[in-house]
Image (cartoon, helix red, strand yellow):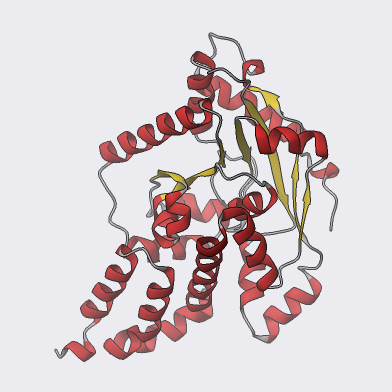
Amino acid sequence: MSKRHSFRNALDSLRLAYSEGDAGELHDTYVNAGKISRLLNIALPLLERAYPVQRFLALAAQLEASMAEHGLHTGCQRFFQEVSIPWQCDLPAPIREIAEKAPVIFFGNHPSLFTPFLAAASINRSDFRLFSTKYVCNLLPTVGAASFPMEVPLTRSWTEWRRSGWQRVLVYRLISLMHDMPTVEEIRAGNRASLIAGANYIRQGGSAIICPGGGGKKKDRKWYAGIGSLVKQLQQSPGERTIYLLPFHEENCSNKRIYAHIQNGPISRFKNAVLYRGPIRIRFAEPIPISDIGVPESTVQQIVELLKVYYESLFLEPAIASI
């Protein structure tokens, strides 16, 4: 088979662009993939109907360019302005003082792809860091440089379907074609190292965001142990300054809203006009000194459960305004 019509060559080109960590280059390679493979020339237009990969990659490239030029805080603010996505931040002055100056772990829900970027746009501090998945770090180099990378499985279709539906399953399957997964032992060691590095960074006065429930909108899901590990490490060796946990909640947004925003068809226009009205909102609750969580004998999992119950009591559905 000639190179011009090779599916393998097209896939290798996509994997190479992904490995180089350039969202713009990956977008261009994806656009040209149909010219290399007859199969992809037929398949990609069908894929676009199910998931707007090309427009999503263009959006990612635009976000990366803005962050690379202006930094996380201003870059994210400018990005939302450029793509005409209205958003609001509820961060009262007394909370802002701690949010922008104290050692802080920001923690909350993750209903959309925008969650960490809304938080970055809201919090004006140069030491803002993220606990982010490795594939996001690779897609957005500026995020990668400011992250403690965490590896997550990409082929648990049933789990991901329950979290956020078939589109999430599809996306993870597409990513798995390009992202080489390490062994289970390597994943555990790498994630543990990131949690240790993150705790040390916060202990020295920095800040970081973590979303313990993972992505998607499914309620009542189990939280991952990472936040409990961070809290336990910092309680055992707290450093010189008071360290805070600061809850946040993203509202009126989902990945479906983002997909509708970047698509141009009549159904998307209808959804934007009728279903997805009003600005995206992120609000922050009172910070909690890390020493107030549990008792010295509390296990990591007990700390996780305490925080989950507390968080859910802060953001009960009846208390969330519909905007």
In the displayed structure image, the side of residue 61 where residue 323 appears, left or right: right
Q: Is residue 27 visible?
A: yes
Residue projecting furthest to the left: 1
The front one of 82 and 194 is: 82
* Residue 217 visible in this rendered orientation of the protein: no
Left or right: 149 with respect to 118? left
Instruction: Give the tally of numbered discs.
Output: 0
Residue 72 position within the rendered picture, expressed as x and y whole percent measured from the top left? 57, 54
* Quadrant in which residue 286 is drawn: top right
Q: Residue at x 22, y 89 (%)?
A: 5
Image position of 231 with respect to 71: above or below: above
Residue sitting at x 54%, y 13%: 298
The quadrant of the image that shows the C terminus is bottom right
Q: Eyeballing the image, is 241 above or below 197?
A: above
The N terminus: image quadrant: bottom left
Residue at (31%, 90%) from the top-left corner? Answer: 35
Place of residue 171 in the rendered image (x, y in percent of width and height, measured from the top left): 45, 64
x 62%, y 21%: residue: 290
Residue 287 drawn at (x, y percent): 72, 29
Between 134 and 104, the one nearer to me in the picture: 104
- Where is residue 223 drawn, in percent x and y? 55, 36
Q: Is residue 221 left or right of residue 38?
A: right
